[in-house]
Amino acid sequence: MSFAEDRRVDYRGTMSTRFRIDSPGETLKFGEVGRPTVIVSHDWFGRLPWLTAFANSLVMEGFRVLVPDHYHGWATTDPGEAGAMMAALDTEEALKRLDALLLSSAPARVALLGFSLGGRLSIMSASRGGADALVTYYGSAAASEHGIIPCPVLLQLAEIDDWAPTRDPEHLMTRLRDHGTSVTEFTYAGAQHGFANEQNPAAYDRNTAALAFARTVAFLNLHLSDAL
């Protein structure tokens, strides 16, 4: 399914470019129960349809994939609307959702994977324990938002990005490594924040997304390998 960026709906009495998604509020589930599991958290646009294709690609690599909805059934392709939706997010509720998915995935080994906002949530969740690996695409977190992360971490970063000083990924990597966390990092030359989102044409880069996906799969195979 594809949505036009100027699609407008009446949201709480105002015209808005946000829209309802399929299976609102539910976690989409792909692949066989018992396989090593990847929990994929969406970026600030919400759970757009491109994530279904991403999840199915992971299934083809032998993983089970869970894709929660942190926006209670809403999504958008408009950056301004996305910013408002992210600002309204109940972060603790989202973290409890991830906690529950981690718990329900046992005894399979499980990785957290997130894009931008979803990357930050995944970092915060990983520091609460329960994950065997963590992958973030152009996602970071401030020192006040996470503790020690006991699992291996893969950071997929864009060369062209605009970080708040407190969330600079260089500082994140330093903190993690200082506490003994294994960190692998790739920065993609010429790529913009959002390069993996097919429904974000201003930033999407097919070749970079494909390379990052291949590296993600290799990382997941390495750290979830005893379940494969």
Image (cartoon, grey):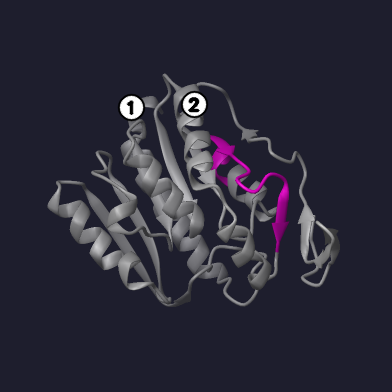
Does 219 sit left or right of 102 as displayed? Answer: left
Residue 62 appears in the picture as rendered: no
Q: Quadrant of residue 141?
A: bottom left
In-front residue for pair 70/207: 70
Q: Amino acid at mark 1?
A: Asp
Camera-side residue of 27 and 215? 27
Q: Position of residue 33 (x, y in %)?
A: 56, 22
Q: Nearer the viewer, residue 175 or 203?
A: 175
Badge 2 crowding class, 10 Å Cα cut-off, few under 14, some 14 to 19, many 20 or more, is many
Q: Residue at x 70, y 66 (%)?
A: 77
Give the residue type at disc 2: Arg
Residue visible at 64% across and 48% down in the picture: 71
- Residue 73 in percent (x, y) is at 72, 46
Which range is magenta?
57-76
6, above or below 10, in the image: below
**Would you place residue 153 above or below residue 77 in this image?**
above
Vertical placement of residue 210 versus 160, above or below: above
- What residue is disc 2 on? 35
75 with respect to 228 (left or right): right
Residue placed under numbered mark 1 in the picture: 226
Q: CA distance from mark 1 to mark 2?
A: 11 Å
Residue 204: which disc?
none
What residue is at 39 percent from the left and 26 percent from the top?
Answer: 227
Task: Characterize the local packing of mark 1: few (<14), some (14-19) or many (20 or more) Cα atoms within 10 angstroms.
Answer: few
Magenta stretch holds residue 73: yes
How many badges with numbers are in the image? 2
Residue 1's x, y, as percent?
A: 80, 54
